[in-house]
Each structure stands twice: as C-alpha cells, then as structure tokens.
Image (cartoon, rainbow, N blue to C red):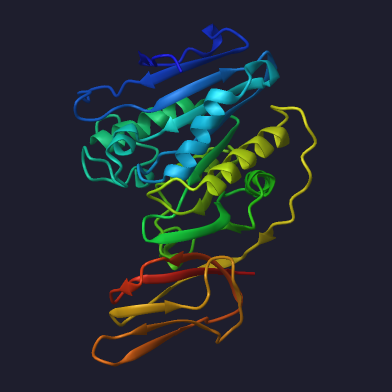
C-alpha cells in the first residue's frame, strides 16, 4: 500500500483507469493533530460503470468490518472493475487509530452527525467531508458495522427511504450482501427514526444518502474489539456480492432469500444483576418465550420475555447488566 496522498478533494476524472489510488481527505479548519480525515482507496476500473461507496470504521472499535474493507481495497484488481469503488477503510480515522467507538476529538458519535456541518465540531466537519466529497458522487452506498463492544449482531441490514423505489433498491443491496434479515424502517410520528429499537438513525450516513435518492444500506455483523476471521471473510464475500449485483464485477449473483422484517424492538431490563441469556443472535422466538433472566444480587430475578414472535438480531454478550440495559433487539414481520 503506497503512502496516501493528503488532498482537499478527489478529482475522479484525473484518476487513471485500471488503478488504485490511496488518499486521506483533509478536514478544512481542523488541525491534523486534532482529527484525521477519512482514509480512502479509490479503485478506478478499466471500463465505465457506477460509482460505489463502501465504508467502514465509522466507529473505531469495529475491527471486523474495517479489516474486510481494507482487504478488499488492497486486493481488488482494478482491471476487473467497471466504474469506480471508493473503499473508505477508515471513515473516522482518528477513532480507528485510537481504538475507540467515539471520536477522540470531540467525543461525538460520527454516525449521528450526517450530513455534517462545515463550521461545526471535528466530527461534524468530517461528516460533511464524507458526504459532500464522496457520498454525493456515488450511485450506491454500503456502510459496514459491527455491534458495539458487549454485543453481537446477526448479519442483518437496516434501510430507509421516503420513496418506494429507493427503499426497494436499498433492500436489494442488503439481500445481495447475504443479510439474513433486512429491516426497512419508517418514521414514527413524534419519535426519532429507529427509536423503537434503541437506535438514533436520523443522522446516519445511510439514511441521509437514501433521502437524496441513492440506494443505501447499513450492514451489521458480529462484534467489536477483536478480529474474527470468519466475520472478516463474511464481510469480504458480502461486498463482492454487492459489486456483482451492481454489475461492477462479473459473475452471476444468486438471489438471496433473506427475511424481510416489518418492525424491531429493544428488550431492556429493569433490574441490575447477572444475565443468563437463552436466545442468542439468530434465534427465532415466539410470543411469551423466555429470552433471558437477570438475577439480582439480593435474590430478586427478572424474566425477559418476547412480546411477540420474531428473530433476535442483536444480543448483549456481557454477563452482568444494569437497569435499563438493552438485553436483545428482536425484529418481526
């Protein structure tokens, strides 16, 4: 890998066809010792085609998705590519280098900052650069994540759009990736987007991209904090499948039969104590089924039961929890 070039903007027409070029995008008005710009490998194909955004490292501890995108960036042969792929290996490079979920520059969650603010905090400036310099120039957007530390995700995706055509095209990206479950979320009156299952999505990159008419999907898989070779391989294979689906790469992409969900809900405990979990990620549960038990240290226990039938898409991996903690997230038709 060559030393990335520090640039204010990637001039796509000037990139030679059949090449991979590494860049670090500057953050206007932000000293480099305060925050680093995104690390990007631009793979310019040998033939015309779409421009695709594949990002990882929104949170610096999501190592499996970061390693999957890094491997693709260094191994994908530009001669095989139609169009251009922006592999954004480290969307939040400062957080990746520090190994932290939040930005060390301002303690913000970058994934809540889109479309960004050129006059804001370092994370808001970074979100603006990512969105204006890269996302706005792309025909499709894929953002890879893992569960935060203390959690484990089923391979699943969330998509959102205000028009049905973009929503369907976004879901098609997730199905092509191989997601076991795809959750199209819709705005609930009086509630932030995603609030019902414990997430704040209004400022997410994939949401803002889709609101601009670009098919976009966030893909979640595995856990954070360490490299799991099986999860990395899953991520690599999934991205290659999406690139075949978009006709960036040759190869027949078989239709994936992942489940589509209608809604999701976070199940939380009201008791602090020791957790025994009976329904890990990927489990199918029925209404009233026992999902877990939180055993209070003083003897009282709380049973966590499924309010309806569904699939567990995220579980906590911690053996001790506090009142209000999310035990699982479950999705249902």
Q: Residue at x 25, y 34 (%)?
A: 122
Q: In the picture, which quadrant includes the C terminus?
A: bottom right
> Which residue is at 34% across, 37% downward?
96
Residue 103 picture quarter: top left
Task: Give the total of numbered labels.
Answer: 0
Name the side, left or right, on which 273 lies relative to 186. left
Residue 117 appears in the figure: no
| Vertical placement of residue 195 versus 68, above or below | below
Q: Position of residue 157 (x, y in %)?
A: 57, 53
Q: Is residue 132 left or right of residue 184?
A: left
Can you tell which quarter of the image residue 139 is in?
Answer: top right
Q: Position of residue 105 (x, y in %)?
A: 21, 37
Q: Position of residue 294 (x, y in %)?
A: 36, 82
Side of 69 where 122 appears, left or right: left
Q: Residue at x 30, y 39 (%)?
A: 95
Query: What is the x, y in percent for residue 163?
Result: 62, 48
Can see residue 246? yes
Q: On screen, 88 above or below 153?
A: above
The answer to which of 58 and 111 lies nearer the viewer is: 58
Q: Give 150 or 257, whichever is nearer the viewer.
A: 150
Q: Is 53 in front, or is 273?
A: 273
Residue at image location 68% in from the left, 46% down from the top = 172
């Amino acid at each position: 890998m060559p030393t990335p070039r520090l640039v204010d903007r990637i001039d796509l027409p000037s990139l030679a066809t059949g090449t991979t070029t590494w860049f670090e995008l500057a953050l206007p008005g932000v000293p480099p010792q305060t925050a680093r710009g995104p690390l990007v490998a631009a793979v310019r194909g040998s033939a015309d085609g779409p421009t695709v955004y594949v990002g990882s490292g929104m949170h610096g501890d999501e190592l499996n998705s970061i390693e999957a995108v890094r491997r693709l960036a260094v191994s994908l042969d530009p001669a095989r590519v139609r169009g251009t792929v922006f592999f954004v290996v480290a969307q939040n490079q400062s957080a990746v280098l520090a190994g932290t979920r939040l930005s060390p520059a301002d303690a913000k969650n970058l994934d809540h900052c889109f479309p960004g603010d050129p006059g804001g905090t370092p994370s808001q400036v970074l979100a603006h650069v990512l969105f204006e310099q890269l996302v706005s120039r792309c025909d499709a957007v894929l953002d890879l994540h893992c569960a935060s530390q203390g959690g484990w995700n089923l391979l699943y995706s969330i998509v959102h759009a205000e028009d049905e055509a973009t929503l369907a095209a976004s879901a098609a990206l997730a199905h092509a990736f191989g997601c076991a479950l795809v959750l199209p979320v819709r705005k609930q009156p009086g509630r932030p987007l995603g609030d019902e299952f414990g997430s704040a999505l209004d400022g997410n990159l994939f949401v803002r991209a889709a609101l601009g008419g670009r098919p976009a999907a966030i893909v979640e898989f595995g856990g954070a904090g360490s490299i799991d070779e099986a999860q990395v391989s899953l991520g690599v294979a999934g991205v290659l499948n999406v690139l075949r689906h978009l006709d960036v790469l040759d190869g027949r992409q078989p239709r994936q039969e992942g489940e589509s969900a209608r809604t999701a809900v976070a199940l939380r405990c009201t008791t602090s104590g020791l957790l025994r979990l009976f329904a890990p990620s990927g489990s199918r549960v029925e209404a009233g089924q026992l999902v877990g038990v939180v055993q209070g240290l003083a003897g009282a226990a709380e049973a966590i039961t499924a309010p309806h039938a569904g699939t567990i898409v995220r579980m906590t991996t911690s053996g001790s929890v506090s009142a209000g903690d999310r035990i699982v997230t479950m999705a249902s038709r």
